[in-house]
Image (tube, helix red, strand yellow):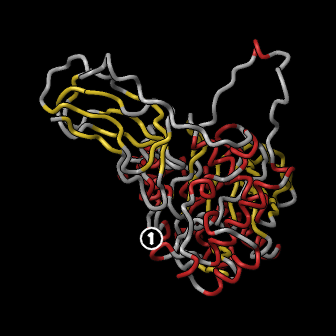
Amino acid sequence: MAVEIKVPALGESVTEATVSKWMVKAGDQVAIDQPLCELETDKVTVEVNAIVAGAIVDLAVEEGATVQVGGLLCHIEAGAAGAAPKAAAAAPPPPKPAAPVASPAATLTAPAPVLAATGANLAASGPAARKLADEKGVAASAIQPSGKDGRATKSDVLAALSSIGSAAAPAAKPAVPAGPRLRADREERVKMTRLRRTIANRLKEAQNTAAMLTTFNEVDMTNVMALRERTKDDFEKKHGARLGFMSFFVKACIQGLKELPAVNAEIEGDDLVYKNYYDIGVAVGTPNGLVVPVLRDADALTFGGIEKGIGDLGRKARDGKLSIADLTGGTFTISNGGVYGSLMSTPILNPPQSAILGMHKIQQRPMVVGGEIKVRPMMYLAVSYDHRIIDGREAVLFLAKVKECIEDPERLLLGL
C-alpha cells in the first residue's frame, strides 16, 4: 500500500515552502527516517524524512515548486523493493504550478505575507482594526491576521498597509531588464531563494518603517583581552566552550537594556511595548544568507551558558538545522562585522526590534591615556535605533554603558 508523504507543519504563521532539493528519485529504496527532500521556508530549511521503509513510487512535485502545509510530496510503497515506479511510463511528470499573472517587479517587491494571505476575519475583529481598514481602504485579503480565530489586529492592518504602500511605490521597485542584456553571455542569472527574498523584504521594511539613526563610540579592549587571556584555558576546561568576546558584549548590553528599557522595547500600533525579558539575537552569516538565532533569557545565563548557547546556535545555523523556535522573537540584536574585517558600519534594525549593536574589528591605535600616548586595541561600536521610540540621549547613554562595562569588566561580574 502506497503511503503519502505530505508537507509537515512548519511553525506558527508559516503556510508554504519551496522544495529546494530532492534527495531521492522514483524507484529508490528508502529506510525509515531517511531524508527525502529539503523544504525552504521564509526562515529555515527543513528536511522531510521517510515515515516507512519501502520504494519511492513517484515524486508529486518538482524541485523549485511551492507547496502548502499538508500538500502531497511523494508516495512510498511500504516494504517494496526498489523498482521502477508504478505506471511511470504512462504518467507524465506533474506540471509546475502555474505562475500568477504579474509583472516581475511586482512579484519581487510585494512581501510574502500579503501575497499568501487568505483574508482576515474583519467582521469578527476588534473595532479599531475594522475602523482603520475602512479608513485606509485595506482589503481583508491583503491582511495577514495574527489574532485568535483568524481575527485581525490593528497592527495587522498597519503591516498590510505598509506592505501595500511599499509594493505600490515606484521607488521600491527593483531594476528589471527592459530588453536583451548586452553581455548576457557572461552573466549568470539565479533565482532568489525564499530566505534571500525574506531578508530583502525585512531590511527594506526596516528602512521604510523606522526612523533609523546610528550613534557611534569606541571601546578600549585592553582589560577584556587581558582577562580573556588569563582565564581562557580554565574556562574551556570547565564549560566546554571557548571564551570569546561575545559573552562580554551580551552581558554589557543587558546591563544597558536594564537601565534604558526603551532600547529593549518595540512599537505595536499606537502602543509602546516594554519587555521585561532579554532574548538576545546574534546575527550569524551562513552560505544561504544572514540569520539571527535568539539566545533566550540571556540575563539568567552565566558566561559559560552564553558561550555554549551561541556556539550551538552558530553550528545549527551553518548546518541548516535551525528551527522556527530558534529564530522567533528576540528583543535586541548584536551583529559582529569585525569577524569579517569591518572597521565601521551602520547596522540595520531587525524589525520589530528598536535597536541593534554593531561590533567591529579590533585595531591597534594610538590613544591618549593619562596624558600619555599609548597604543591600545580599540574597537568601534555602533548602535542603530528607531528614533520614534528611542531618543538620542538614551541611545548615547546605552552605548556609553556598554563601553563602561567592557573597559571595566569587573563591573559585569558585580552587576554594576
| Residue at the extreme top | 185
| Three-letter code, disc 1 | Ala
Given residues 414 and 169, the one toward you in this image is 169
In the rendered view, tell whether residue 77 sits above or below residue 283.
above
Q: Position of residue 401 (x, y in %)?
A: 70, 70
Q: Splitting the image into 4 quarters, where does residue 400 fall? A: bottom right
Given residues 271 and 411, the one toward you in this image is 271
| Residue at the extreme front | 90
Quadrant of image for the N terminus: top left
Which secondary structure lies at badge 1?
Answer: helix
Left or right of 221: which side holds 372? right
Label 1 neighbour load within 10 Å: few <14, some 14-19, many 20+? few
Which residue carries the number 1 mark? Answer: 300
Residue located at (82% from left, 61% from top): 370
Residue located at (59% from left, 50% from top): 283
Left or right of 195: which side holds 61? left
Q: Position of residue 94 (x, y in %)?
A: 42, 29
Left or right of 162: which side holds 310? left
Q: Splitting the image into 4 quarters, where does residue 358 fall? A: bottom right
Residue located at (71% from left, 37% from top): 341
Left or right of 214: which side holds 13? left
Q: Position of residue 86 (x, y in %)?
A: 24, 23
| Residue at the extreme bottom | 127
Given residues 109 and 93, the one toward you in this image is 93
Q: Position of residue 392 (x, y in %)?
A: 82, 73
In the rendered view, tell whether residue 236 sits above or below residue 63.
below
Residue 53 can be seen, yes or no: yes
Quadrant of image for the C terminus: bottom right
Q: How many marks?
A: 1
